[in-house]
Image (cartoon, rainbow, N blue to C red):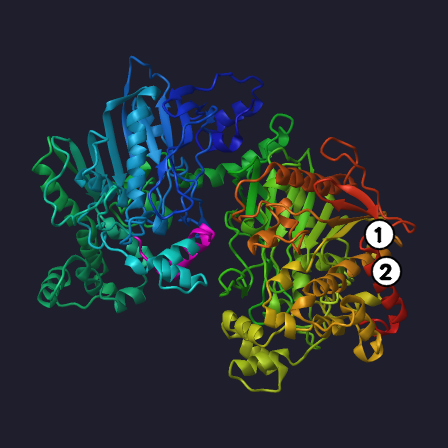
Amino acid sequence: MLPDITFVMMRTSLWALLFLLVSVQAMIRLEPLVDTKQGLIRGLYADDGDYSMFLGIPYGRVNEDNPFGVAQPYPPFEEIFEANDDSAICPQQEEFNKTIVGSLDCLHLNIYVPNNVTSRNKLPVMVWIYGGGCRIGFAGRFLYGPKYLVRHDIILVTLNYRLGPYGFMCLDIPEVPGNQGLKDQVLALRWIKENIERFGGDATKITAFGESSGAESIERHLLSNNEQFFNQAILHSGSVFTPGVIKNVGNAGPTMLAKQLGFQTENIYDALEFLKGIDVKLVIGATIELNLAFLTCVEKEFAGIDSFVTEHQITKFRLESNNMPILSGYNSHESLISSVLETEDYCNNTDIFDELLPTAFDGEIDYLRKMIRRYYIGDEEPSIKVKSELLDFVSDILYNYPVQRSLDRYLKVSKHVYHYIFSYSGNRNFVKTRFNVTEGGASHADELGYLFDMGTLDKEINEAMWPLLFLLASAHAEISSRLDPLVDTKQGLIRGLQADDGDYSMFLGIPYGQVDLDNPFGPSQPHPVFEEVFEAFDDGAVCPQKDKYSESFIGSLDCLRLNIFVPNKSNVRNKLPVMVWIHGGAYERGSGTRNEFGARFLVRHDVILVTINYRLGPYGFMCLDIPEVPGNQGLKDQTMALRWVKENIGQFGGDVTKITIFGESAGGSSVGQHLTSNNEKLYNQAIMQSGTELAPWATRDTDTSVPLKIAKHLGLDTECIYSALDFLKKTDIKLVMAAAHELKFISGGCVEKKFDGVENLMTEHTSSVEVVQKAKNMNILIGFNSMESLIYYLRKTEDQLNTEDPFDATLPLAFDMDKLGNAEKHIRRFYLGDSSVSYKQVFSQILFDSDINFNYPSQRSIGRYLINAKNVYHYVFSYAGGRNYQKHQFNISFEGASHADELSYLFDMRYPFGDISDEDQLIVDRMTTMWTNFAKYGNPTPDVTELLPITWPPVTPESLNYLNIDTCPSVNTRPLHQRLSFWDLVYDTYRHAIKGINN
């Protein structure tokens, strides 16, 4: 089996790569297997050195009922544990791209063992505890590669521990006493002490070492009353005497977080109960928004509860660990990085003495402040002129002197104390290299690049060698079936990354378009060509919208991005079908991020998945009768993304002759609007889920008053559209979105007025298009869910069900009410009988809303596509399981499938569904197989198999065949026959009243 080109490139020379590419034989080695107290663990051999790796061994388990409390040891393995994945990260804001990542299944450790170890040749052990201010960090090889250390015949262990609120929330209650992250470390150290000899380690020679808050952690272990798990200690740039390291949010933490996330309470236990059910990423996001610092604290002691820090470091004079060799030091210019991160304005307007001295000293310190200021800057005021002196002060108070204070304490009890200062400035200085700092000396964390093989420091090598490697891989496609994660597109070089949940590559946040900031409500432009390699690592961009979880307004106009997920078997000779996903959200919210639409389920079927963002709300769907804002900007963004895909997807191994666009709700209606549009055909097949172009909400009337109303709401009263637009373009987008929301602006497509030189997408109403020319000889799949509107009505209050009339709300979107006449009474009577709208008639309201908004529009579209399409497949999704997205989210147990419930059987949605049941997995497998079969073959069931035991026939003019997707799938004809036949009668009889007809 050939090695992964990506991995080899980062660690060998070009000639070694060439040799490996053309080599036809590989050495076969049995994977290392170790019998531990926890069970059998199988590792793997490294390919960058003579050592074995045991990755992601779970040492502890977070209590899901109390994720902020103490973890428990991980139970014994029932089968061999495959230790081959070090990607687990505890919840945090990722350091490099600022996205929120991680899960609570993160208490893992990694062990790296030189291959010369034997039971008679036990090796010393070094246990690394990372820094990161108790809020960021992880133990994976990307940051802490073992190659440099293990070649010196030591065993290296790296470990994860919880961070932020999950690791350091400190409350005066026994359930969350505090310092859970430090107690996670204790759990890991205990595991190592009990098991490391099975890996050939010497349990009497364990050295704990760490940097920054990792070093502080080690000193706290030295001070604690717990048993001793290591024999020596190394502390880099960290001390318990660092000002401010022992403080906390206190008992207000959980209630503040709960309030930020929409739950108001003053009861700690109620807040914790609420927070445990919230997505960890939302909790971390709220922590960041509130600027809360969860750190080490002095714990309140409770009977039966193990405490870790029971006394402040200032008052505890004695180390519990005697006669231990200790090595401690700092870097020559610890705070040098501030020269990049702190602006001239910050230096001129911030008194760093006032900020930091109160964190180190209590009481009245005015005299002390004057003396210290005079020592560092004389009679100068803090400013950019004395930046060097200010940095010296910051280094001294935060790192240098705290380390010296700790050294003085170590000398009283330790066997030997060694002190160092790291001053070297070279190409592997971690922080300086990352931020391109050229000043002399070593900044905080700069020494790490000389201890660990850090992947982040290989950027220059990567950029120089990837283009050549891509060409080599293309030329030797018959040798390597793995797509290189650097792709040469028409827009420039794009570097992706390997997924950690499957055998595929990800290219995240590729900008396909650029909003014109002088006209943000008008057409966008293609994104310019990249001048350098574009690092496609971040899919966090979202277009302006109201977040559905926090109810806050989020996003920016730098949002026209797409994400590409490519199976690793794809290459230039093995092109795969492409599926382009258009998200729903009523044209007002949504994005193409992995949190919503994870690719894992689909790409394992050998298709390339593309997800896209497009503008929403007033920025995407303001429709004015002027050439600057003709309308349908969000749909035109989608067109631009589809053009980008058509032009570039071949470079990712995609087949441009097999592009299927698919979407749900407003995404499904968008697909239908593209089919009926005037633009070129950029795809070959289409799937519409719970939304088509004929949905009454998909096309709205032009309203030239919208910018005037929004501007007036925000303080500008004008009757001139251009003045309003000029005002709004300068207004914060979140204010514009909030005003549009308060004014109940409703988004949707519109019929555009034609202007010379302006590209139109919709120049006639979708209802008036009789023959869809783009559908000619095209395969199309359309369907809806069995109880579409269930979620909307079961969430309403009794008062809302009594007062909000769905007939009044929806019929005017579908019909000209003056022309509909008495038919409205017949429609009401069909659903309600002689009753009025009320909570007692909620089921009838659900049926009406489902039929007029989703079910019948789908049937109308099918009738139109049958005229010239190759095949039209129809489905009804009825399955009610543990992954029904909407029903699960709102805890609805009613039978059937609500709107959007099918999505989590197609996508790996980052939503806490819990463990997937066998039946849910079966539906996932069936749905993804049928959808990808359609993308590959134009037929969802080309063969009868055990998984798909039936043939799904297409619709014909004589028979409206459909597949009912449930636990036992079945083929039937004419879904909801009586109700939809009633609508046939209404639409045929009152054709003249249909919105868009003859208009």
Q: Which residue is mark 1?
A: 974
Of mark 2 and mark 1, the one earlier in the sequence is 1
Residue 197 in view in this figure: yes
Would residue 800 be found to the left or right of residue 449 on screen? Answer: right
| Residue 501 percent across, percent down from the top left | 53, 38
Question: Residue extending furthest left?
Answer: 412
Give the magenta range. Answer: 276-294
Would residue 446 be found to the left or right of residue 281 on screen? Answer: left
Q: Is residue 289 magenta?
A: yes
| Residue 904 percent across, percent down from the top left | 61, 47
Is 805 above or below relative to 170? below
- Pointer 2 with pointer 1, Cβ within 8 A: yes
Query: Which image quadrant: the C terminus?
Result: bottom right
Q: Which residue is mark 2?
A: 981
Under mark 2, the amino acid is Ser
| Residue 524 percent across, percent down from the top left | 62, 64
Under mark 1, the amino acid is Arg
Q: Residue at x 39, y 58 (%)?
A: 271
Where residue 883 is drawn, which disc sits there? none
Q: Residue at x 52, y 56 (%)?
A: 541
Report crowding for label 2: few under 14, some 14 to 19, many 20 or more residues within 10 A (C-alpha): some
